Amino acid sequence: MSESFYDEVLIDHNLHPQHQHALPTATCSHAGMNPSCGDEITLHLELHDGVISGGSYTGVGCAISQASADIMLDLVIGRTPQEAQHLRELFMKMIAGEINDDELEELEEAGALQNISKMPARVKCAELGWRTLGALLDEAASGNIT
Amino acid sequence: MSESFYDEVLIDHNLHPQHQHALPTATCSHAGMNPSCGDEITLHLELHDGVISGGSYTGVGCAISQASADIMLDLVIGRTPQEAQHLRELFMKMIAGEINDDELEELEEAGALQNISKMPARVKCAELGWRTLGALLDEAASGNIT
Amino acid sequence: MNEFTLKSDFPVFTKYPDLVYLDNSATTQKPQAVLNAVAQYYESENANPLRGLYDLSQKATEVYENARIAVRDFIGASDEREIIFTRNATESLNLIAYSWGKANLHASDEILVQISEHHSNLLPWQHLAKETGAVLRYLDCYKSGTYSLQSLKQSLTPNTKIFAAAQISNVFGQLYPIKEYAQICHNNGTMIICDGAQSVPHIPVNVQDLDVDFLAFSGHKMLAPMGIGVLYGKHALLESMPPFLTGGEMIEYVTRETATYAEFPHKFEAGTVNAGGAAGLHAAIRYLNALGFPEIQRREDKLTALAFAEMQKIPHVHIIGGDTPDAHHGILSFTVDDVHPHDIAAIFNADNVAIRAGHHCAQPLHRHLGIPASARMSIAFYNDESDIEKFVDTLKSIRRRMGYV
Amino acid sequence: MNEFTLKSDFPVFTKYPDLVYLDNSATTQKPQAVLNAVAQYYESENANPLRGLYDLSQKATEVYENARIAVRDFIGASDEREIIFTRNATESLNLIAYSWGKANLHASDEILVQISEHHSNLLPWQHLAKETGAVLRYLDCYKSGTYSLQSLKQSLTPNTKIFAAAQISNVFGQLYPIKEYAQICHNNGTMIICDGAQSVPHIPVNVQDLDVDFLAFSGHKMLAPMGIGVLYGKHALLESMPPFLTGGEMIEYVTRETATYAEFPHKFEAGTVNAGGAAGLHAAIRYLNALGFPEIQRREDKLTALAFAEMQKIPHVHIIGGDTPDAHHGILSFTVDDVHPHDIAAIFNADNVAIRAGHHCAQPLHRHLGIPASARMSIAFYNDESDIEKFVDTLKSIRRRMGYV
Ligand SMILES: Cc1ncc(COP(=O)(O)O)c(C=O)c1O
Ligand SMILES: Cc1ncc(COP(=O)(O)O)c(C=O)c1O
């Protein structure tokens, strides 16, 4: 990999995360982890009237997992769960190297993680937030809110 | 190894063994085997007045184990157990490549097996009769005759 | 492809131009392409894989995982995670016995084994039976080396949990109808474990078509280096099995008291893996694929037929097993009247012909056949007609050289 | 010997002249001499060993058994039969647990393990404890990576059957007083199992002097190819132990119902052995002997001291374990404030420096130390001062490159 990997976007979200805090108003939470790295993230969402009206994460992990989760929350807050799931799919597509330019644009800052696919050992870090989001939304949809 | 290995002496003892038969007059017997080859030999001796007055072997095995046992019996019949043990030691020395010319002469026809040391997988075949003899004489000496 | 050029791919025949190597069932020689792949791995891709936090380690991981994918395709598995790298077929079979076996077998359960099995596909079951109180039963074969499907059906009871069978016998060379075996076993709720040590190198094997539950084989019998083998297992079985060896690289979380394990296949690959061996196995598969099984079989079948025909003409020589060459798949075990197999092998060696003698790790079979031991010549595609001629010449001379007229 | 010429013995550094390889504890690179020995084996000595009925097989047997003798001498064993070839240290340790452990451990027996152990010298005991009902206890270390002999003595009870300890920790680099451990253990009737994975490649080890009951190590961490490892065991122990893996090459007689086994070491080497790997390990030992441990240690100690001194000067960098360089034996694990070890390793990689990050297969130790993970650089004798300089340069830049001032 090249050093450019830790670019401004990533470093900024890692150093100054907007969404890393507890969320007393959360309607649902879900913990995700990445055994090979030791990354652990708990995602908290506030779901109201079919919209993700708020969100945050807590936990520890590498810069990639933290920044990726922070960027993700920037993107999905204010969207419907369906839209969020769509973005999750796009993100996975991007990591798999199968995304087109229009789709990449939809991902906005999350596109900064495109090159992670060259470092397979770190892919799971980048995906952690998104995988946790997917699991949480699936649970919420099926009524199993925890 | 070279073909000369199966020389006249060996082939003759294998084809026309003098001592391969039962021995009703035996005073002691001992079975030896060589798991890697499947060789099995039972040695029968007639011990009278401190002399090996007769002997034979029964069993199955390769030409080397059979001929070696037959040659051995030629050598030890008529000798004392001490002399037989001495010859056994010389034989082992020969196989280990540590024998001198005088000693080799003592072994008479058993010297035909000198080159077996080049074929380590077959060493145990050549030694089988001698090892069984050693065990049998040790037992006899300690009074544990079977 | 020219009929006589393949030996030049194998450095051992350059080194020993007069060597007639006919012990291919024991282990094969290695082509330059395999040696090069191993060297290339250590020269430019070597690191501890599966911890890929830097480029070289990432390369090592790719070499290792690409080999897994190559094995998957070679044996027609649907999922590369069904491929576990082991040391050899023996370890693969022990892994099943220790992991699946100890977790699933109980007293009064039964294990059925072909009597012709290699010790490596027999002792793990004998050991497992002793440990669990299960009963070990044998399916007996005819002198021809074949089994009756009827007697397989009759030998299976509601308690039979495992049937263990080689696809090709290392003594007879007989090819067994594994696909039919699998159907019969599965109808009875019995798992079928296939020992592919002698088949995978010589015929196309497709685990999905055969529908076996497990398949074990060794790299070193199919041009790869020693020290790398394979266990294929069906997804659902591997998923349910406890680990066998424990240690580094196969865990998720470890605490003082307990541990959770990685997903298969890594769960079964404890400690630093043999990526260099996997690189060699991958190159071996590439070589075999490039030549192609139609060509491999054409060559081996032709040489088998030639040797079989000549051997049949020699008085006092008796081929063990089937009485047509196509029952032998390159493996011809035999006896010579009045000459012990070890003496036979020694005389062959004096003529620079490498064959094997003994029980070929199949003592119960030899006892069943009523012979203490046998000699065996076994063919690979790189052998040629002159190898067979030299073999036959020596075979003809054996009794004379042992003093018989 | 010229201080800077050794890298030319290692083809990987010719291929990648800019590579700074500092992950030697995970696996070492291989010198040309080792690659040549492996190639030579396959070019002119390859056959199935231990069935030596023809010249080539005899050669293979000699290569394999000569490697055993070389290992015997390398670790100061008195009898080559005490050397068992395995796949890696992990398999060696599992062999003890499965064979000696299952036969000798009972409920209420105790196993004591250093908390700093690698998972490979911890999970087999955790697993064995679960299987037998024995109790697994830990000896806790200080932050310095050391243990108190007093607390070892106090932790041993009349029921303690096994004490498992690495000679050198793969996280701290600390060298433990195995000889004293052995005395204390033996006075208590406790067996001592030494994990030599990190010591045998770097310091002279003599099993008779240490008086350990078992010693396990891996070839790939000491210049040899992957896929070959060693278990040393005392004569009397190996003699009494039941086999572990069963199959070809390790038997005497096999019947339908039961089997008798070959003598050790063959009893523990089931299936076709890795003679090619043994040839490589032998060449690795020759290389290490030619260089000599005084020189190996001189080089490694010097580089360790250099790296240690520079790292100590860098703010926000914390070395784990002892606070003098001679407590580290070439292994320097560290953290950088606010930067996750995986990010540290990624930045090093961008600068072509290969180091490791994570829990180094020692999760319980990291939890004991209260850190989730760490980064680790580890030195071999072929590293040079410029490697250390590049390492230090990158280390200095890490926090800045992660956005800290
Ligand atoms: C101290 C220690 N023990 C055991 C091992 C396991 O070695 P291997 O993975 O070669 O089995 C390692 C290395 O990974 C180690 O550092
Ligand atoms: C039919 C069969 N099964 C199993 C084995 C064992 O293979 P390995 O010794 O490579 O484990 C062999 C070869 O020795 C064999 O011929």
Image: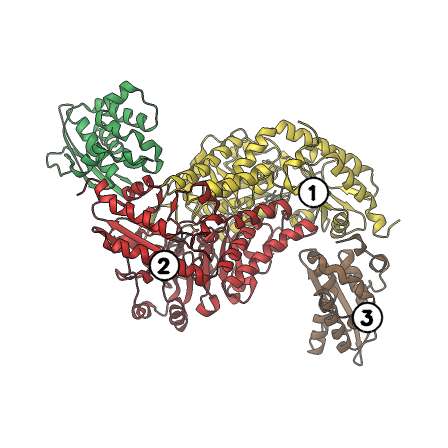
Chain colours: A green, B brown, C yellow, D red
**Residue for badge 2:** D302
Label 2 environment density (alpha carbons within 10 Å; few <14, some 14–19, many ≥20)? some
Q: Position of residue B8 (x, y in %)?
A: 85, 58
Select label 3 or label 2 by which is in front.
2
Picture quarter containing residue A22?
A: top left
Q: Are marks 3 and 1 on the same chain?
A: no
Q: Nearer the viewer, residue C286 or B21?
A: C286
Subunit ID for the residue under disc 2: D
Residue contact between numbered discs 1 and 2, judged by CB atoms under 8 Å: no
* Residue occupying the far top of the picture: A102
Label 3 environment density (alpha carbons within 10 Å; few <14, some 14–19, many ≥20)? few
In the rendered structure, which amino acid carries the disc numbered 3? Glu
Q: Is residue D316 left or right of residue C238?
A: left
Q: Position of residue D314 (x, y in %)?
A: 23, 52
Residue at position x 34%, y 69% in the image: D157
The residue at label 3 has a CB less than 8 Å from ligand 2:
no
Q: Are marks 1 and 2 on the same chain?
A: no
**Residue for badge 1:** C21
- In this picture, is B106 found above or below C77? below
Residue at position x 41%, y 65% in the image: D192
**Residue for badge 3:** B105
Instruction: Report, in whole angstroms, how far the alpha carbon at label 1 lies from the one at label 2.
Output: 52 Å
In the rendered structure, which amino acid carries the disc numbered 2? Lys
Does the image show residue B137?
A: yes
Residue contact between numbered discs 3 and 1, judged by CB atoms under 8 Å: no
Q: Quadrant of the N terminus of chain C?
A: top right
